[in-house]
Image (spheres, grey):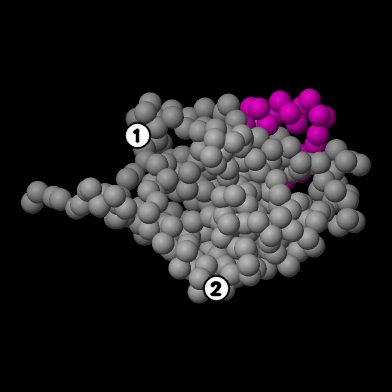
Amino acid sequence: MSATIAPLVKGFHDAKTGSIQYVVSCPHSKKAAIIDPVWDFDEKSARTCTNNADEILDYVRDQSLDVVWILDTHPHADHFSAAPYLKQRLSAPTAIGEHVVKVQKLWKNIYNLADDFPTDGSQWDRLLKDGDTFDIGRLQARVMFSPGHTLASITYVIGDAAFVHDTLMMPDSGTSRADFPGGSARELYASIERLLTLPQDTRIFVGHDYGRGGRKPLWESTVREQIQTNIHLRGGISEGEFVRIREARDAELELPHLMLLALQVNIRGGRLPAPEANEVSYLKVPLNQFASPSKVCGPWAIG
């Protein structure tokens, strides 16, 4: 396999969450992988639907692609993963980084899940280690462990493209937050430093974009552009200064509005909790466990 083949990359932007989903395909074989697919959720009606995933399926069909992998970069905090739905439709295996088991154990405790909830990553077909490789037709994909945003975050380097999830953002937006449970600004800095050692022409595909300053959403840059123009990295910033900037910014951010719902789905590999006796699934919300940056609300209880 050749690591120099440039994959064809199609990005799908979910306007509601700012998430980018990718279909990465080999131009020679029509083999493809899907990265970070979104399972739509309307929190007002508590209904799921598959608009985003069905758009991906339409593209796969129209391009006559053979999907051989469905990949997540980490358990997402802002959307549900559509990996199981796409696996059902495409019969392709699912994968995520091996440290997802740490995230499962952490959030099992936060949600006070039953003892029999598995925290061994068995919800995915393959758990990937740093340095693991796998094929997408004539493309070779390589895994880079890149924690900081979460304990389990990985990057997929496929040919001349790197899918860096929530580490880097577009250069005018800087870098991703590192204040979730298990996150670390210092680990994020180390992960970014490692990513920036990739060849400077490597195409960087980010996990989110919110159309900063009213511009249209974007998701592709290069290592060179990140080094030269990223607002959090310019000038060879030191670890200490980066941590100061990142932690100060994170202290101002509200939690993603779907986080407490999404994580309990995504630690299950994108599945809802098992239906109860009435054949309905229920999500749990841990009350008064997370601070509000606005400091408007505080814990209050009767009893």
To which quarter of the image does residue 31 belong?
A: top right
Which residue appears at 58% of the width and 26% of the height? Answer: 51
* Image location (x, y in percent) of residue 219: 66, 43
Distance between mark 2 and mark 1 Cα atoms:
52 Å
* Image location (x, y in percent) of residue 241: 51, 71
Quarter of the figure that contains the N terminus = bottom right
Query: In the rendered image, is residue 33 in sight?
Result: yes
Disc number at residue 239?
2
Which residue appears at 74% of the width and 58% of the height? Answer: 224
Residue under label 1: 277
Q: Amino acid at mark 2?
A: Glu
Which residue appears at 75% of the width and 31% of the height? Answer: 60
To which quarter of the image does residue 188 belong?
A: bottom right
Q: Nearer the viewer, residue 88 or 63?
A: 63
Tell me the magenta residue range: 53-70
The question of residue 85 being in magenta is answered with no
Category of crowding for the residue at label 2, using alpha-carbon neighbours closer than 10 angstroms: few (below 14), some (14–19), many (at least 20): some
Disc number at residue 120?
none
To which quarter of the image does residue 89 belong?
A: top right
Which residue appears at 82% of the width and 54% of the height? Answer: 159
Query: In the rendered image, is residue 71 in sight?
Result: no
| Lower sequence index among marks 2 and 1 | 2
* Image location (x, y in percent) of residue 286: 30, 50
The question of residue 64 being in magenta is answered with yes
Q: Amino acid at mark 1?
A: Ala
246 sits left or right of 154 in the view? left
The correct choice, above or below, for 90 with respect to 1 in the image is: above
In the image as oriented, which residue stretches furthest toward the front?
A: 235
